[in-house]
Amino acid sequence: MTRLLKILEYSLCSLARRKFKNFSIIIIYSFTIAALASILLLTHSLKEIAINVLVDGPDIVVQRLAGGRHDPIPVHYAQDIAKLPGVGRVNPRLWGYYYDSLYQTNYTILAVHQDLPSLEMVEGRMVAANGECTVGQGVAKAQNAEIGDELLLINSTGVGYSCEINGMFKARSNLWTNDLILFTEKDLQGFFAMPAGLATDITVEVFNPREIPLVAEKIKRLFPDTRPVTINEILHTYESVFNWRSGMMLTIFASSLIAFSILAWDKATGISGEEKREIGILKAIGWDTSDILTLKLSEGSVISITSFLLGISVAYIHVFLLGAPLLVPVLKGWSVLFPPLQLAPYIDMYQIFALAFLTIVPYMASTVLPAWKSAITDPESIMRGW
């Protein structure tokens, strides 16, 4: 143990003698790890947030297709679906998207119904009559509106529409309600010029989660023009979207990977003449090849572990404390009224260990291999520069 401690002490002194070179290596190394870790941490956190919210959503969402596109579905479909064994509540939903060209924002407009997600009123009350609306905090902020103000929109026929804001709400996750506006069913039908008897989709509750695929199959056989989407399919879709966007970000940061590869290649192709002479002197005064390898392994460990911990710390601060300002514009999606991110520190240890293995091990190998080549060479030849 004393021998190893002495070798470690010498390795720290050796690193201090080349402090500027080693400091530049640590900076590049840490930046590479911080960039990759930020993408992994942010993607995993967003997926966990989405999953935690979506698990409380409907078990099945039934959509009608016409020409391969989403089309309004007849409300009477809900009555036949409710008769299927194992089916609980069945609720037709009216909703749609609206682009406000004045404020250049996108809104989601939903008709109030009994299967609304859990909403917490911040101010005012829930919409109860025609000519009223309840808005999410993001909508109120974008419109600079307060309770009692008029919300001015343009309906689908190009005519101006106004309704009184009688309440503002928030939910457990502002990801889904920040851009939400609640109308009565009659007002929404008039706003989107949607005929009576039609809905945007139908939500279905299934008592036994194991029977969700079976119920979806029965709905498809009962109404061939529909597309039942199960909760597992929705979760898989969100996971795929986040994985695709994180992959796109990893591609953008490929330059950092290239820089790290060049750094590792430079270390693997050889060491400086000064380091070779140092190895030759150590061999001449009695150091074994194993001692030289232990020395270089210690130096590589100090640099790689320091860089890894520094990179992970920077990534944690960037994602969970600062809200990932450099990555959120790409990963958050198309919504203009995206709420301020308050990311919970969901960390996948498998990803951390995988990142450590893919960054630390190659650097350690590129440090030890050239040192081994010099250590097995005759010390006199090394010191003479042959």
Image (cartoon, rainbow, N blue to C red):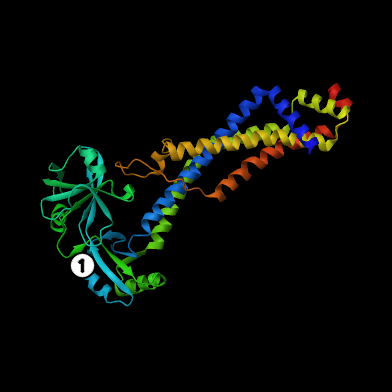
Judge whether residue 241 can be spotted in this image. Answer: no
Quadrant location of the N terminus in the rendered image: top right
Q: What kind of element bears circle 1?
A: loop
Q: Residue at the far front: name it.
A: 2
Q: Position of residue 297 (x, y in %)?
A: 73, 37
Using the image, determine if residue 304 lies above or below residue 383. below
Residue under label 1: 75
Quadrant location of the C terminus in the rendered image: top right
Whether residue 261 sits left or right of residue 346 in the image: it is right
Judge whether residue 141 can be spotted in this image. Answer: yes
Q: How many marks?
A: 1
Q: Quadrant of residue 193?
A: bottom left
Residue at the (31%, 50%) spot, across then down: 176
Whether residue 250 sits left or right of residue 289 in the image: it is left
Please rate how many residues cluster around mark 1, counting C-alpha atoms within 10 Å: few if below 14, some from 14 to 19, many from 20. some
Q: Nearer the viewer, residue 26 or 244?
A: 26
Residue at the (23%, 53%) spot, across then down: 96
Q: Amino acid at mark 1?
A: Val
Q: Quadrant of residue 21?
A: top right
Q: Position of residue 230 (x, y in %)?
A: 37, 64
Q: Position of residue 92 (x, y in %)?
A: 23, 64
Whether residue 148 sits left or right of residue 337 in the image: it is left
Q: Position of residue 188 (x, y in %)?
A: 16, 55
Using the image, determine if residue 69 lies above or below residue 379. below
